[in-house]
Image (spheres, rainbow, N blue to C red):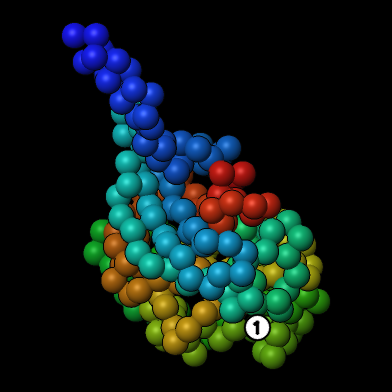
Amino acid sequence: MRTLLALGAVLAGLYTAPPAPLPERMADTGGGTQLIIAEAADARATTGTLTWWDRRDGRWVRAGSAPARFGAKGLAEGAGRRQGTNTTPTGLYRLPYAFGVRPAPAGTAYRYARVTDRSWWCQDNASRAYNRWVEGLPKDCRAAESEHLVAYRTQYAYALVIGFNYDRPVRGRGAGIFLHVDGPGATAGCVSVPRDAMRRVLAWADPERRPHIAVGTRGGPTAITRY
């Protein structure tokens, strides 16, 4: 009996409880009951994983996952990011609305804007429409400093606007950061996922549950758990 008790004590000492779900280890999840996490191994990575989560009965439960791509130059702290660096901004952001070249997937609850031939995302730092969707370019927004959304039929078949630098835009920090469908490789600063995953995210996301997206790394200054 003593031997069995001693063995049990040893085994108990060796037992390590599994880590809590990633959202439980975050400093902030945005206050809603849905959360999207885009995580890379480190700030130099251009690939990682997207997971989306529901809060049920006081616990976070993973609802889905998919491979993700990040900026061609990796990730950078959102508060200090500079426009044109091909880095994905880290941080915790709201998701203002969805858009796409294609019709909204069945079940989409988000406000969904259809892309037309006149749809642009203004990225001109001198424009009053900086970091905004516009139908027809304003006179103060140069085409060379903006994205003609319809030109990216693959990537913007379906997309969610990430609220980086959106509510009170800081000139030079960056514009046009989205969660969208994969293109041929790394992004210019967005987060991208396979087409089917993007459709699943849009069918799952419920604006009444105030979903946010957290972008970051497994450790270091841009760790997901900091947000």
Q: Is residue 225 left or right of residue 86?
A: left
- The reply to whether residue 8 is visible in this rendering is yes
Query: Badge 1 is on which residue?
Result: 146
In the image, 109 versus 178, the foreground residue is 178
Q: Amino acid at mark 1?
A: Ser
Q: Quadrant of residue 190?
A: bottom right
Mark 1 is surrounded, within 10 Å at the Cα level, by few (under 14), some (14 to 19) or many (20 or more) other residues, namely: many
In percent of width and height, residue 224 lies at 56, 49
Quadrant of the snapshot with the N terminus: top left
Q: Is residue 173 left or right of residue 205?
A: right
In percent of width and height, residue 181 lies at 41, 75
User: Which residue is located at x 50 percent, y 53 percent?
Assistant: 213
Q: Is residue 69 above or below residue 213?
A: below
User: Which residue is located at x 49 percent, y 49 percent?
Assistant: 212
Q: Is residue 46 above or below residue 52?
A: below
In the image, 198 versus 135, the foreground residue is 198
